[in-house]
Amino acid sequence: MNRVLRPQRLVSQAVSDAARLVAPSGIGLDSPGVRLRMVERLRRGGRLDEAVLQAMERVPRHRFVDSALAPQAYEDTALPIGHGQTISKPSVVARMLSLLREGQGAQQRGGLGRTLEIGTGCGYQAAVLAGLASELVSVERILALHQGALQRLAALQPELGWARTPRLLHADGQSVDAWRGPFDSIVSAAGGDDIPAAWLQALAPGGRLVAPTQQAGGGQALTVVDHVLSGGRSEWVRQTVEGVHFVPLRSGLV
């Protein structure tokens, strides 16, 4: 028997199929559904602050990487951004910012307050922080990365509508003259042998700092520092949280 080829469905079949259809979602990297699926995977992992996840859900991560790498933007992986630097894994960004928000000062303020980011990179974490902090200062020592981040954040400002535009500086992250404190929250995207003294001095009482540091046994781990007042005296209470891998902390402008 010869088959009859039908270039179109019968009207009755089309009506029946249409009744079962739902509106498509998640088509294309600009779709909110793509970001939502990334955030849902992070949420299932636990230990993450809901406000951080909601901020990440708004920021289009693919706009911060090379177009050739855009299809991988919502996977939980670090990606190269040039100049020997990377955009951190979404899970690492979420974990570090969640640790910031777990600080006693942040809980009392209801947010991160005035925040300093060391290492703007491509600008992705700055875009997430802009939705969490009352004021954000972000410094980057590599001029090309600084300029790229400026352009990306300026393009996203109308879309994301931050209450206060992030202040991006081409500056040495270890130079206190470039970014005057105090800051309620400090986060670093590069790891050194120890926390620079300038960062500790820039951390306001009640503030919290999260940064990777080199460990004696090798490798890096996230270090959390809280600035507490005890008997009228400042103390910086440290704890080591978990292993990570970040680019090394360096000085000097490039």
Image: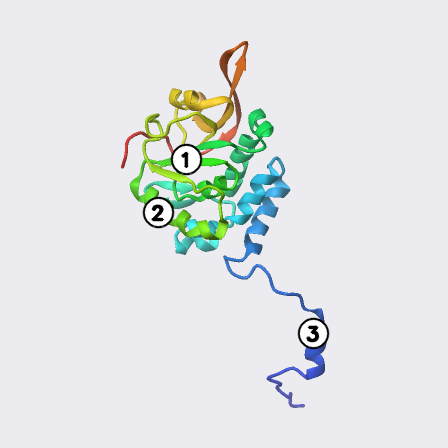
Disc number at residue 148? 2
Dot 3, crowdedness within 10 Å: few (<14), some or many (≥20)?
few
Viewer-closest of 71 and 169: 169
Q: Quadrant of the C terminus?
A: top left
Label 3 near label 2: C-beta < 8 Å? no
Sequence-first tag of 1 and 2: 1
Quarter assignment of residue 116? top left
| For residue 246, side relative to residue 207 (left or right) | left
Position of residue 217 measured from the top left corner of the image (x, y, whole percent): 45, 22
For residue 137, the mark is 1
Q: Residue at x 38, y 22 (%)?
A: 198
User: Could you say which is closer to the camera, residue 86 or residue 163?
Assistant: 163
x and y, in percent, of residue 21 in the image: 67, 68
| Residue 156 visible here | yes
Which of the two labelled residues, at mark 3 and mark 1, occupies the earlier sequence position?
Answer: 3
Three-letter amino acid code at the position of disc 2: Gly
Would you name the residue on which mark 3 appears?
17
**Against 25, is 245 above or below?**
above
Q: Check residue 50 in the rendering and tell me which mark sits there, or answer none.
A: none
> In the figure, 94 relative to 225: above or below?
below
Give the amino acid type for the residue marked by disc 1 in the picture: Val
Disc 1 vs disc 2: Cβ atoms closer than 8 Å? no
Q: Amino acid at mark 3?
A: Asp
For mark 2, does the 10 Å Cα neighbourhood hold few (<14), some (14 to 19), or many (20 or more) residues? some
Residue at 56 percent of width and 55 percent of height = 32
Question: Could you tell me which secondary element the residue under label 1 belongs to?
Answer: strand
**Residue 16 vs residue 165, the one in the foreground:** 165
In percent of width and height, residue 200 lies at: 43, 21
Q: CA distance from mark 3 to mark 1?
A: 53 Å
In the image: residue 27, left or right of residue 121: right
